[in-house]
Image (tube, coloured by chain):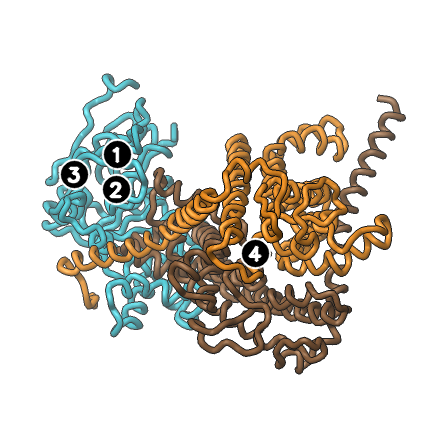
Chain colours: A cyan, B orange, C brown
Amino acid sequence: MSMNEREPVTRPSVSQIGASAPSGATEATSASSTNPALLLENVSCWYGGFRAVRDVSLAIPRNKVTALIGPSGCGKSTLLRSINRMNDLVPGFRMEGEIAFEGTSVHARATDVIDLRRRVGMVFQKPNPFPKSIFENVAFGLRLLGETTNLHGLVEESLRAAALWDEVKDKLDQPGLSLSGGQQQRLCIARAIAIRPDVILMDEPCSALDPKSTLQIEELMRKLIRDYTIVIVTHNMQQAARASDYTVFLTMGDDRAGYVVEQGETGKIFTAPQQQLTADYVSGRFG
Amino acid sequence: MAGVSTAHRPDSAAATRRGEALIEFLLRASAAIGIITTVGIVTVLLVEAIFFFGEVSPVDFFTGTRWSASILPYAFGVIPLITSTLMIAFIALVLAVPLGVLAAVWMSEFASQRVRSIIKPVLEILAGIPTIVYGFFAITVITPLLKATILPDLGTFSALSAGIVVGILVLPLVASLTEDALRAVPRGLREGSYALGATRWETVRRVLLPAALSGIAAAVILAMSRAVGETMAVVLAAGTNPQLTLNPTESVQTMTAFIVQISLGDTPTESIQFKALFAVGATLFAITFTLNLISAWLVARYRNVYE
Amino acid sequence: MSTQTTTRRKVANALFGLLAFLAIFASLITLVALLIDVVVRGGSSVDLQFFTSAPSRIPAKAGILPALVGTLWVTTLVAIMTFPIGVAAAIYLEEYAGRGRWSRLLRINISNLAGVPSIVYGIFGLALFVRLLGLGRTVFAAALTLSLLILPVVIISSMEAIRAVPPSQREAAYALGATRWQMVRRALLPAAAPGILTGIVLAVGRAVGETAPLILIGAVTFVTFVPVNPFEDKYTVLPIQIFNWAGRPQAAFQEISAAAILVLLVLMFLLNLVAVILRARLSRTIQW
């Protein structure tokens, strides 16, 4: 299917997001429909001369799980990592377009990237706890902020919120690396939420985990959206269907750059997609 | 949601940036010490050598075949020192290269993991022994051994004794660098050869050694550089007789031995001998630096081929 | 293929294996011979009196006290000086410098310095520290010179230790809002510490055995008193004491030279042991 034959990509207006409230949502206030947590407009990303992402426009709704799905190589992770400017670490990376977080542009000169990363946290594909104790892992971000008085309390809260407290409360001084894979990932989640970000970005957080741990983390995500907005990149369509409220489907164009094919409420995307490509992908015909 | 004490710090962002800049400056200054040292070494050697060449012509220095720095009539032809240095280095390489390459081949292709884990530490220990101890070993074991077995007329000091001991000294270097070079050869080459029914020796001779040749050459040249720069072992074993000879049973003086000789004496700092120290030092530096560059270039070449 | 050729090839193979094994064996034998020679020759001279006396014209009365103290002084100062500078330079080259021409030049420069003969460092130290800066023939000048000598080695091994830390660790720290220095100090260095410390201890071990540079910068060969002020006093070190005794023809001096070698080797062995223990201890919590 060439570019010319495709139907025009539907770009959701901000009002559309709140209008179709997902059934699994715990709370759909009017604030979230007109006040997305993140707004991406015409975002393109380059690694040197190679364009990885083309003209992506998205609105990420507040306090929901938004899943970015699509075949591998279509720029989902690149897009995710642009939000908290982790791509700044990659030499030769360039971004055009606008990413707005709480109304201010992420790439503006006045934006303090350190502060941005405190408010937009990230969990990585392979769990990467520090070679420190469980306690020190969770406390890492708190210590960066100069927090000293209430460390224990905050660490416990975060571990509870990450559904890990009961398993580690008696061994907080054990190395984080002594935990199992699923526990390590929950530790990384606890570490990320300890500093109370507004948004949590998750880059295929379950791809290195066994099915049981995967389900645990999906359950955790559903609980976390009470306090956080979550954006998750996932290869696993069933996971997206199970755990997300809102889904964005990207694919790779002929120029090998990723673009948004369709986005909308998860239920609709999977049962009644508007694009043929989407239908093909979610039914497993490619990718 | 319990609050984190410092939620938002826009004012301290500038302070953080200043602190980070200061730290980066300090770190960069530390790294710059490397450049400063190189520039310093080159400058010192060059300047002092120029002072020397104000009194002794460079032509006499580089082409003269008589060296007599302490005994009148003075002569400052550096050729005897260079030939002595090279002769000892050559003897060392004759010993170290075949044995070192064989050892590396054995460790890389023949030995079991368990045996390798014993041999590698042994080689590392050999490499770590101070060179003064090797010098001692030369005069207490090697020279008597040579006298007792094949060279009964051997003097207390000889280039041969020094060369043997320096060979032992650089053997671990040759072995470990050759092992690196062999390891860089892709498995596919080995497997292809074995699949055609070649024995291990044949694979080594026809496939591996040719493939690792640049790396082995680099190892040899680096070992030569090490041997040329070696001081204490040759001072103790070869003596301080700056004669122009190719006879390894004679006592000779290397460049490094001359430098030590002048330092040990009470030579006044403005004397010609003291200046000669720097001139010889500069020559030594130039030779080893060139050898190191060649070796590094060879390593870069084989790394590029396989990585 | 005739069986005759095959047999010949197999024999050649076996012969080669034997030859290679003998090469290894020769190395082993040499090491053992060296150690045995030193132990046999010098073992009996190592007693308390040996440790507590000064050198003397009478071998039986001679001891290594000034030399040992000098070695300890120099070694300690070298360790103190190279640690911060070496690690700082390594951090800069690995984390702050780009991959551009300037940083490549810095790296190549460090590699080159690592290959410069130690006697050249002695010459440089003589010209710069002893004469130009007027520090004289003191422990301090010796420590500065040896620090320059082992600095490239410390930098290279620290760089390797830092490089061994996976990028995911840096990303984790950055994602939590760390500045570059915060990432280095709180995440990177703790993880690289075993490798860095091991490298420093091994490099200092090398400095302990250095002789030529110290002869150049004026370590005296016959010192009867113990240095107290590192900025003023004359001094000697163990390798030079060994050199001094080894150069004397009398067998008795050869014996005490061997004894001093034993002490030196034990000292270096202990340092290596410390390095091994450090690495084992600290890396217990680090399993990538």
Which of A125/C146 is in front? C146
Residues at marks 2 and 4 on the same chain: no
Residue beneath disc 3: A98
Q: Amino acid at mark 2?
A: Ser
Disc 4 is attached to a residue of which chain? B
Badge 1 crowding class, 10 Å Cα cut-off, few under 14, some 14 to 19, many 20 or more, is many
Q: Which residue is mark 4?
A: B262
Q: Can you tell which of label 4 and label 3 is closer to the viewer?
A: 4
Give the Cα distance between marks 3 and 2: 11 Å
Q: Considering only order in the chain, which callout, 2 or 3, is on the residue closer to the N terminus?
A: 2
What residue sits 67% from the left and 55% below the top? B126
The answer to whether B216 appears left or right of C31 in the picture is left
Which amino acid type corresponds to the residue marked 1 in the rendered image? Cys
For the N terminus of chain A, the image quarter is: top left
Q: Which type of secondary structure does the marked residue at label 4 adopt? A: helix
Q: Secondary structure at mark 2?
A: helix
Q: Is any part of residue A260 visible from this angle?
A: yes
Query: A184 or C31: nearer the eye?
Result: C31
Task: Give the mark nearest the N terminus, 1 or 3.
Answer: 1
- Amino acid, disc 3: Glu
Residues under numbered marks 1 and 4 in contact, where contact means CB atoms less than 8 Å apart: no
Q: Are marks 1 and 2 in contact (CB under 8 Å)?
A: yes
Q: Which residue is mark 2?
A: A82
Circle 1 residue: A45
